Amino acid sequence: MYSEAENSEEMKLKKRSRILFFLIGLLTLIMIIVSACGGQATPTQAPEEPAVEEPAEVEEPVEAEEPAEAEEPAEVEEPVVIELWHWAANKEPLYQEAITQYYEDLNPNVEVVSKVIPNDTWQATLTAALIAGEAPVIFHGQPKGPVLEQWNNDQIVDLTPYIDDEWRDAIYPSTWDVLTIDDKVMSMSFATNNIQMFYNKTRFDELGIETPIETMADLQAASEILRENGFGTGYYWASLSQLTPQFFIGYATQMYPDEFLAADIGDGRWDTPEFVDIMTKVDSFSDIWEEGVVSISLDEAVNAFSSGDVSFYFIGNWAINSILANEPEFEVATQPIPALDENTDKMAMASTAGTWMVSNQHPPEVQEAAIEFLRWFALNNQGLIVEAIGLCPAGPAGEAALADATDLAKQLCDDSDILISRDMFTRVVQDAMASAMQGMLIGEVTPEEVLQETQETKESQ
């Protein structure tokens, strides 16, 4: 039997045990509940790794500024190519010199290509190229007739809108007259061939023949004095038959400019009383020519004048060098062609030394580059042709070149500002007139018949 004290101690132990079990159970229950609700037990802490000293933080390099983005090189423009055709091989070095200066020194984005076409195939080659739409942007030609035909066929550019004051001032008004058709500038030229009267000044002075000779009647009187003293009289531009109408053209243009133009390219007639009167007066001074004038060659005529066999010679710039090369033993002088009568004036007759047209078969930028090249040439390089060939400048911009020209060339160019065109528009009609006038000069055809034949040729076209 336990004593009362022992029983009391045992009861205390049991009571403590029950409390302990109760607490353990409660704790277990709490853990189960927490686990069921997604709670996570705290993981057992891993043993600490030995501390490793971190290296000092390396400063990131300062980001270098990116170099400024290089500009894309400007796109190089394709050069504008200007193709230029001409037939005069003796002028090729002149054109090439100017061309090189233009696109190498002044306008590197423009390339000018010059091509010589043989004279005997020129017209056929150019015509075929124009018809096929393959013509160069600049091409050489004869003034008036061919130019008008190309304009009527819608093949060339009207230059008028591009002619500024500087360009206009660089060319004589008389030259613009030759280049202008129907108030449109259709072509451009840099020089002129001027026809005047070359004469043996030493002989004229010795015989007391006063110069300049004013009218054809005065020249007839001078011819009588020459013959009386045993000297030959004169020639005119030899057997170049197409030039035979030059006197008639010049006088008719002075007296009846509108009627002449109408007969040439309009509804006017050639066989009018006014024109017959002029042709009759031209025929009246046929006795001033030496026999054989209609068949003499150019070289024969030049030699006859240079040697003194004839005393005067109607010719242009192209004969100057040949005459001087023969070293005539007399002073050579020139003067304008004498007036027909009191109703006309002395005249310097001229044709442009070729003329340049711009084809409209190319893009606008090529056309405009071509026109700018012609403008530059007119302002800066007329002198090249004057110096090298002895032609007259087309305007004041070329006059400086005359300082180094021969005295004969200077005399011939003195009247460049009063030139009268010696060209007709319709070449076939002009050739018909020339042929008939050749017959008139030897007395086989009358002035009326010359103009009747001319009119018939016009009507047959």
Image: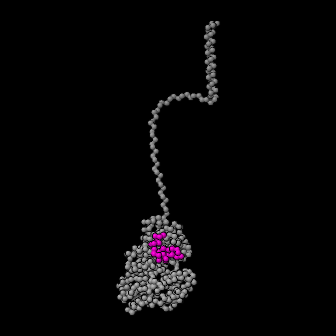
What colour scheme governs how the chains and residues are painted in the rendered image of this protein?
A: one colour
Q: Which residues are magenta?
A: 164-190
Answer above or below: position of 65 versus 310. above
Q: Is residue 364 magenta?
A: no
**Placement of the N terminus among the 4 image quadrants:** top right
- Residue 339 versus residue 24: which sits nearer the camera? 339
Snapshot quadrant of residue 30 = top right
Asked whether residue 264 appears in the rendered view, the answer is: no
Q: Is residue 175 magenta?
A: yes
Q: Residue at x 55, y 28 (%)?
A: 44
Residue 183, image x and y in percent? Answer: 52, 75
Residue 242, image x and y in percent? Answer: 49, 83
In this image, 196 relative to 454: left or right? left
Taking the view exactly as shown, the residue that stands out farthest to the bottom is 228
**Placement of the C terminus among the 4 image quadrants:** bottom right
Residue 391, image x and y in percent? Answer: 42, 77
Snapshot quadrant of residue 191 = bottom left
Answer above or below: position of 386 versus 34. below
Q: Residue at x 47, y 70 (%)?
A: 165
Snapshot quadrant of residue 195 = bottom left
Q: Residue at x 50, y 83 (%)?
A: 255
